[in-house]
């Protein structure tokens, strides 16, 4: 089979809490740009139980078509059943590129499909582009500990695949006038063909840090020197009603939990305001917060990379500057701090 037989760009449409997951809508935006560049259709692939009506959600966000597998066997996500549906659809329609959200479901499914089809997969991609002539997907991500950006190509196999984390791409403004084609698919698959059984689903009860939903984040890095020094971040965040974030170095030092980590190996965030305090600005951190509305950096190293990516930078000792900021807010303790 020739590589030229593969045409079109797909996005796996993940369903979360009864709707298309936001990351899938974001990927439709990236997919639309690449599809226009290649002059090929953009399609969504939707798998689930009772999901057909959700297919129309994809059209205002850029999809031309949606392939739908709607059957009770897909009620719960299981690698085997979803993988078989994707593989059958790929073999039938031959897309050149498939994008997945880098969620627990997306990462599991993409790796299983890539293994079975013996094709390439770039994980946790932060930038996507396509060569208009060759159709080569250019998937970029930090490498070697976040010190360089690597662009990965899959020259000899199709479909080319990538996972992209939530908030990395931006969804298009929905155009409610757009319509598309819903293509209903079916396959021979019985419950006894699936080795995995879902016995029980237990919802997490622990209160979760929602960095990805925060309007204001105060993040600290290794420049704070110790766990005791990092307490300054908590004080400042509490005073201004912000959520606490951290660099990978601060997390690996044990100063704060991984759920607070921002960056390639943590959470991608898009707050209105992002304070980067004692953070040098490694690539793997920058890719996780570069789309923040306003970035304010505090670092005593005037050559820190973070100053190349911030809107406002303060060169100085955080232990002198941050207490002044806290004091400034404390002068009006009853005044509510608002943003936006």
Image (tube, helix red, strand yellow):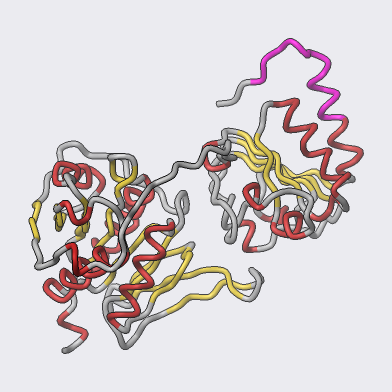
Q: Is residue 142 visible?
A: yes
Name which residue lies at 89% across and 45% down: 317
Residue 33, percent from left and from top: 30, 58
State the extent of the magenta-drawn residues as a range: 324-337
Quadrant where the N terminus is found in the figure? bottom left
Could you tell me which quadrant the C terminus lies in? top right
Measured along the vertical axis of the image, is residue 200 above or below residue 36? above
Q: Position of residue 214 (x, y in %)?
A: 57, 35
Is 182 in front, or is 41? 182
**Residue 108 horizontal side relative to residue 204, left or right:** left
Residue 319 lies left or right of residue 81; in this view the side is: right
Q: Of 46 and 247, which appears nearest the observer?
A: 46
Task: Check if residue 336 falls in the magenta segment.
Answer: yes
Residue 27 in the magenta stretch? The answer is: no
Where residue 210 sits, quadrant-wise, is top right
Left or right of residue 120: residue 207? right
Q: Does the rendering let one see residue 39?
A: no
Q: Quadrant of residue 64?
A: bottom left
Q: Along the horizontal axis of the image, is 249 left or right of 1?
A: right
> Residue drawn at (34%, 57%), measured in percent from left and top?
30
Residue occupying image coordinates x 87% and y 32% = 323
Q: Position of residue 245 (x, y in %)?
A: 67, 44
Residue under the image location 54 percent in, 51 percent down? 268
């Amino acid at each position: 089979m020739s590589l030229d037989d593969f045409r079109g760009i797909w996005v796996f449409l993940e369903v979360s809490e009864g709707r298309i997951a936001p990351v899938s809508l974001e990927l439709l935006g990236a997919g639309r740009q690449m599809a226009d560049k290649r002059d090929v259709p953009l399609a969504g692939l939707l798998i689930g139980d009772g999901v057909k009506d959700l297919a129309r959600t994809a059209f205002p966000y850029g999809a031309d078509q949606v392939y739908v597998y709607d059957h009770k066997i897909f009620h719960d996500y299981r690698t085997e059943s979803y993988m078989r549906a994707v593989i059958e659809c790929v073999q039938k329609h031959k897309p050149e590129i498939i994008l997945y959200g880098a969620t627990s479901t997306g990462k599991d499914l993409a790796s299983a499909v890539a293994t079975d089809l013996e094709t390439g997969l770039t994980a946790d991609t932060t930038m996507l582009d396509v060569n208009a002539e060759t159709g080569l997907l250019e998937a970029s991500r930090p490498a070697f500990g976040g010190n360089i950006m690597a662009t990965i190509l899959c020259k000899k196999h199709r479909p080319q695949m990538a996972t992209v984390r939530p908030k990395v791409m931006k969804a298009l403004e929905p155009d409610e006038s757009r319509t598309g084609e819903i293509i209903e698919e079916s396959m021979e698959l019985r419950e006894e063909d699936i080795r995995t059984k879902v016995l029980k689903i237990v919802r997490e009860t622990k209160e979760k840090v929602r960095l990805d939903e925060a309007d204001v984040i105060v993040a600290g890095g290794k420049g704070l020197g110790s766990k005791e020094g990092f307490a300054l971040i908590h004080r400042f965040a509490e005073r201004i009603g912000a959520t606490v974030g951290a660099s990978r170095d601060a997390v690996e030092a044990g100063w704060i939990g991984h759920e607070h980590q921002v960056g390639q190996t943590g959470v991608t965030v898009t707050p209105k305001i992002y304070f980067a305090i004692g953070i040098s600005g490694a690539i793997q951190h920058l890719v996780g917060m570069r789309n923040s509305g306003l970035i304010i950096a505090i670092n005593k190293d005037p050559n820190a990379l973070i100053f190349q990516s911030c809107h406002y930078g303060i060169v100085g000792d955080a232990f002198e500057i941050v207490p002044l900021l806290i004091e400034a807010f404390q002068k009006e303790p009853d005044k509510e701090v608002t943003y936006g």
